[in-house]
Each structure stands twice: as structure tokens, then as C-alpha cells.
Image: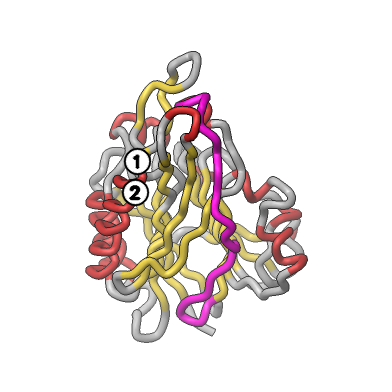
Amino acid sequence: MTDIAVCVVRVPKASYHAQGGYSAGDLGQLVDQANSFMGRLVNQAQGLHMVVAPEYFFSPVGPIGRLRNLGSQPMTRTEKHDLYGDLEKVSRRAGSTIIVAGSIFYRKGNGAGARGLNVCPVLRRGKIIYKYYKKFDDGVLGKNDPAATYDHKDTKPYFKTGGVRFGIEVCGDHTNNGNNLASWLATNPRTIDVQLLISDGNAPFAPNMAARVGGYFIHCDLNGEADAAVRVYTTAGTWQQASRTTVDPRIIVDSGLPGVELRFFLLRNV
């Protein structure tokens, strides 16, 4: 068992809109800050460090849909690959810190044949060690381009690094039966130490919280105005409301990016 220091990035939607989305450089600044604080909770020689960003973190912002409200816009496939390269540089500088880098919303092609995808990359030691593609179509692509088709790659919601077994979901996958971690575990039995949910407007759903007894559930939502959007839970039994416990942040730091806050949690004996 190991202890994990976790930095969950709290991003209010208003700040995200005002900033017009964030860059790999912005995430790099946050990761550098996070590493300077996480060492106060766990020495990396004895435990793990992890940074978690919300869904759509890197997406440009602009008017979408019939009402032309501000919303996330897809980048091109080329821009996605350029972002991968920049994130790998951030990860190299961060050493063994695990970076759950929000999600990258991108489009392949244009017109009737265009496809949109939303991928969450996980990085460590300068490399992308895992990619999870969101399955659930939340309608954002259609608001950007009604002719485009939402798509995904068949990736499992599970990865292991540093001896810890992680389950991961992006927003609507968590509550959409058939797409979520709980459904996958029914036919692919695994023990989940830490379940991750990154989202833009979703919330933990007790029947689909699947980490083991004594495990953890980490939620990072783009609607960071509310305290409930950035939380960590643990449980001594089932994940029903009465038996799960909110883990209080040990440190809260203003990141320097407008409105963005870093919340640090200590996960013990994972």
C-alpha cells in the first residue's frame, strides 16, 4: 500500500470562458506549483503524486449552438497531436508525477464526413501512459457542427501505474449504463483502488461508484464554482451517501491563473 498526494484543479466555468480555454503551458504552471506543495504531504520516495484537471480543460471557447452561447469548441487533429507533444514536455519536467490531463476535444475532417472525439490522456515520466476516449455524446459536437458525427475509440476505463489500480470515466460515461466503469467491471473483474471522474456538469452516482472498500473516488468538474465540483470521497462499505465520507483538502492554493484554485488531498494506504 502507498500514500498518494493529489492535486485537484478547481476551474470555475466563468474563468474557463473568460480565459478561452487553457494551454499546455498553463497546465505546466499548475503542475509545477502542485509539485512544490505535494511534497509536504507525501515524499515521492515513499508515495505518489498526482494532478487531475477537468474535462474540456484545453478546449477553445466560442459561441456554439442555436443560441450562440459560449461553449467548448473542438481543435483539429493536428492541434491535438501538437498538444500531446507539449504535454509530454510538461510531464518530463514533472518526473514521476501522474498527470490526468483533463480532456482534449478534437475533430477529424470537415463537412459530412467529420468526426468528433474527446480523449483524456494520462502522463508520467514524459510519456502518455494511457488514453481514455469518452463514449457518451453530450451534444457539444452537434452544437459546433450539426453535420459531424460523434465517435470514440474502444478504450477500457482502467489503468495501473505505481502499483495503484485506477478506474476512469469522463462525464456522461459515469452515469450512462453500458459506458461506465461499473458496467465494464461486470465482465472484466478488477479491483479499483482509485476511481477518477472528470466532467463538465456531472456528479458522482452512488450505484456506479466502484472503488474497493477503503478506496477513493476523485471528482473534478469544470463547474468549479460549487464546492461539490471538486471533491474526494472514501468509504468503509457501500458507496451510498450514508456510508461514504468526504475527504477534506489539506491545502488550498490560489494558482495565479484567474479563478483557478489548487486543492490538495492526502489518500492514505491506497
Query: Measured from the top left, where is residue 163 in percent x and y?
Result: 51, 82
Q: Quadrant of residue 19?
A: top left
- The residue sitting at 58% across, 36% down in the picture is 138
Q: Residue furthest top?
A: 67
Q: Which mark is residue 80?
A: 2
Mark 1 vs 2: CB contact within 8 A: yes
Task: Report which residue position mark 1 lands on.
Answer: 76
Instruction: Give the secondary structure at mark 1.
Output: strand
- Residue 15 visible in the shown view: no
Q: 10 Å neighbourhood of mark 1: few (<14), some, or many (≥20)?
A: some
Q: Residue furthest front?
A: 113
> Which contiguous range is marked in magenta?
145-164
- The residue sitting at 49% across, 34% down in the picture is 113
Question: Could you tell me which quadrant the N terminus lies in?
Answer: bottom right
Front residue of 31 and 144: 144
Amino acid residing under circle 2: Lys
- Answer with left or right where residue 42 lies relative to residue 258: right
- Give the answer, above or below, for where 213 lies relative to 208: below
- Residue 133 visible in the shown view: yes
| Residue 163 colored in magenta in the image | yes
Q: Quadrant of residue 216?
A: bottom right
- Answer with left or right where residue 12 lies relative to residue 245: left
| Residue 37 colored in magenta in the image | no
